[in-house]
Image: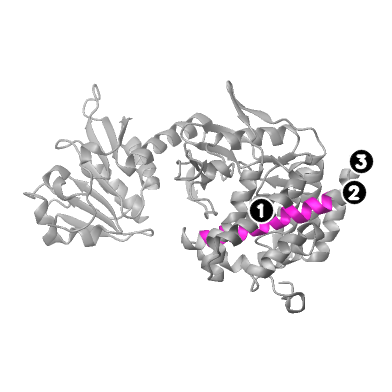
Amino acid sequence: MVNGPALMPEQDLLQAAWIVTLPDHEATERFAKILAEELRPGDLVTLSGGLGAGKTTLARALVRILAGDPELEVPSPTFTLMQVYDGPRSPIVHADFYRLSGGYELVELGWDETTENAISLVEWPERAEDALKPEHLDIRLDFAPGGQGKGRLVMLTGTGAFASRLQRMKAYRNLVERCGWGDARRQPMPGDASVIRSYERLVKPDGSTALLMISPPRPVGPAVRRGKPYTTIAKLAETVNAFVAMDKGLRALGFSAPYIYGEDLEAGLLLIEDLGAEPVADQNGPIPERYAEATRVLAQLHGQTLPQVLPVTDGIDHTIPAYDLEALLIEVELLLDWYVPHIIGTQLSGSARAEFVNLWTETLGEVLSAPVSWTLRDYHSPNLIWLPGREGLQRVGMIDFQDAVLGSPAYDVASLLQDARVTVPPELELKLIGLYARDRRAVDPSFDVSAFARAYAIMAGQRATKILGIFARLDRRDGKPHYLKHLPRIESYLVRNLAHPALGKLKGWYETYLPRLIPPADEAPPES
């Protein structure tokens, strides 16, 4: 008996199916490339079907593609039972269980150890299915009706975690074929802080590119307050609809959000314009003229009357949620939940936490009673792309705005000018705040610069407090320790913000309970 977590019987696992017709050998080769793009280390693919149905042909094509060698000799493993090949991403195991009497024989082959981090392709899996993990992709090949023995009918069945992957694979193929990108090669892109969203670059044979945004519906998390999960309270987008609506809204106003070539809203797939990778900051920090243009984009956006409801597609609208007190508070409380215990290494009393929440509630009341605008929420250097081929403010390309809310105009200005990943010198920050204020007053002479400065300090303090908690959480919960290197910068920003009179009471709290973070004035650390 093997110890470990119990597995659900296969019939209880989620399943999904997809039927594909392969009329000839060339179609089989193309299909193998599609499959190879989806497979990753640890995956199990079983190949079923009668003699001559094409199991070995498909497996051979897959092995060659996964190994990156179109001329690789791939003999049938009928007599060796198992062949192992080196691949750039992982080993590839090609097995044939036709001569096995049961799964117990796999122990002698060292099956579990060999396949743990490999992509495994198994012919005749039914001979040892009792020893194979239930979560897998099964491919059953049969002769296509009327094909005179040439065509094949392929039934793909995803079981367990493979069910959603297979559904997404099918949706992806339908999307790219519909949009004319079926011949594009997929290239993974580095991930961001999101745990549910990822991107791939699609490259056509002629070199043109697009981006695939993979953003399935956000799973419902555990209730954390009044029966609601954190994501609902913090007003985070639950589906890709929010991105589509904000994208269309920004482009309608003349801003450079990516054009959407095609979408599958149910699957959470978008095929969007590739704006490139020209940054607004380099190894030396912010590029001042690019940051200035990004600041002016915000001034132009905030100077307009903006709708709260935006169309997604026919019959579907998206209502931009309010950045209300509940959302703002649960974000600053991330400092208490993650940064204080895991970075500072202390625990706060219930009274200290209550005082923190009460002080932030009082402080935020000032900005909550002021006029609101679209708050894109992640308007900073990683999400801004310089487009030198365009004119004026359209040179600032924007991405990652799906969590937009209706909030203080000061929030996005603070997000840019106190960039979490790039140190913005105080003199540049002050200069660009002045640029923003001048642009706003040029359109609206009644724009209150003093009130904006107070709102800026409050929202910058809220954001810095929140990000300290988020980056600590990314390290401890999500296994992304590289975010910790940004903490000194954000701590420095927070010290800068707390010096403003609008945050005077809160400064006293930080000095009392987090003296290492906010030391007495004569011991304050230098700017990072």
Residue sitting at x 51%, y 46%: 197
Amino acid type, residue under disc 1 in the picture: Asn
Q: CA distance from mark 3 to mark 1?
A: 32 Å
The x, y position of residue 450, in whole percent, is: 88, 51
Q: Nearer the viewer, residue 441 or 399?
A: 441
Dot 2 crowding, Cα within 10 Å, few <14, some 14–19, many 20+: some
Q: Quadrant of residue 68?
A: bottom left
Q: Nearer the viewer, residue 223 or 315?
A: 223
Q: Are marks 2 and 3 in contact (CB under 8 Å)?
A: no
- Give me the disc on residue 446: 3
Q: Which residue is mark 1?
A: 358
Residue at image coords 47%, 31% = 266
Say which label, 3 or 1, has the lower sequence index: 1
On the image, the x and y values in percent for residue 484 come to 56, 66
**Other residues around mark 3 within 10 Å, as few (<14) / some (14–19) / many (≥20):** few
Front residue of 23/181: it is 181
Q: Earlier in the sequence, mark 2 or mark 3?
A: 2
Q: Is residue 223 above or below residue 528?
A: above
Q: Which mark is residue 109?
A: none
Name the disc covering residue 438, or none. 2
Three-letter code for the amino acid on which mark 2 is drawn: Arg
Report which quarter residue 16 is drawn in.
top left
- 429 or 321, which is in the foreground? 321
Q: Are marks 3 and 1 in contact (CB under 8 Å)?
A: no
Q: Earlier in the sequence, mark 1 or mark 2?
A: 1
Circle 1 — which element? Answer: helix
Q: Amino acid at mark 3?
A: Ser
**Magenta residues, as a range?**
452-473
At mark 2, the secondary structure is helix
Q: Quadrant of the C terminus?
A: bottom right
